[in-house]
Image (cartoon, grey):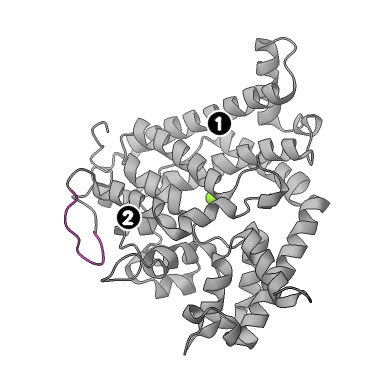
Amino acid sequence: MSELAPYAVTAANSRGRAHPDEVPTHRSEFQRDRDRIVHSTAFRRLEYKTQVFVNHEGDLFRTRLTHSIEVAQIARSVARALHLNEDLVEAISLAHDLGHTPFGHAGQDALNACMRAHGGFEHNLQSLRIVDLLEERYAAFNGLNLCFETREGIIKHCSLENARQLGELGERFLTRTQPSLEAQICNFADEIAYNNHDVDDGLRSGLITLEQLGEVRLFACYAAIARETYAGISGRRLVHETIRRMINVLVCDLIETTAGNIARCRPKELADIRRGEALVGFSDDLREAQREMKRFLHTHLYQNFQVLRMTSKAQRIISELFAAFLNDPRLLPPDYQADDDQARRVADYVAGMTDRYAMKEHRRLFAVGEI
Ligand code: MG
């Protein structure tokens, strides 16, 4: 790792771990966090969780796992260019979606509706609950005992009500201060990754077309450059030559705009980052281009009738599973049967399921003739 900027997160300015741990011998504290995340059970489940397309719809679509790896790749490039902590952004990126339910946002909305009378369900908070509480890997404590800054990065957004219950970690939402630059980078890397891979997956699925994308400024601009560079280019190669250029321009703009903001605000240490304005961001032009792409994907992909059909099926599966388990907790595996706050334990169980496991559990509980 190149030399870090004085306002980067380091082991020296870290607020540390809840349970004191020995200093690692051959790796940094944040490499250790990343390694703990990679070895967790929740991380392996990401392979079988939907991003937009349900896992069994095709082998080539992104899953939460490949999405998280793409986010980590982008975040590391940005962090390295800005002399920030690459290990930390990698750890945050790989953990940022751990709390997602099966079936993507449809699953989360359904589980949130089920949990309305029991404190709600939010995937950010669930990611934190996993790394703080639910992973069972150490004899002496629950969870993974990650550094404060890794946990802080996982909480991207949070209601004020929830923030009040998060203690130290919730403070920044109440005082309107900023998280580390590393955490800010991961939010943007997430956005760059999903906008671009959803274009790729959307085209692959046939739900959106190159002609439609021609109406989106960013795509049209880089498709034209690809066509000029390679006469007669078409199909998959045209798509990839366009998408790689879009990712590159977004990443470069993010690095350059952020470097400009840093130069203007001259932070001297990590505390200045937390006190000041948010420094990581796109230029106005690219921010608007990203918004246009998001609007396009929302209208043409996320609201496509075939995606909505899956969404409505997913909502039914999640809410029926939740209701069945809460009505009769004896149907749950013993670990999830609780003396108090049974609803939260049902949510933990349902949220932890992969897409295919949720479908299987649903069949086991509801299909006549299945056991
Ligand atoms: Mg994500």
Q: CA distance from mark 2 to mark 1?
A: 27 Å
Q: Residue at x 50, y 46 (%)?
A: 68
Q: Residue at x 69, y 65 (%)?
A: 359
Residue 247, image quadrant: top right
**Residue wearing tag 2:** 149
Residue 171 position (above or below residue 214):
below
Rendered location of residue 116, percent (x, y): 61, 78
Going by the image, does 260 lie left or right of 297?
left
Going by the image, does 220 lie left or right of 78?
right
**Residue wearing tag 1:** 247
Rendered location of residue 16, percent (x, y): 24, 59
Residue 191, image quadrant: top right
SS type, badge 2: helix
Q: Residue at x 30, y 46 (%)?
A: 31
Q: Which residues are magenta?
A: 16-24
Rendered location of residue 142, percent (x, y): 34, 70
The stretch drawn in magenta includes residue 22? yes
Seen as rendered, the residue at the extreme right is: 305
Residue type at mark 1?
Answer: Ile
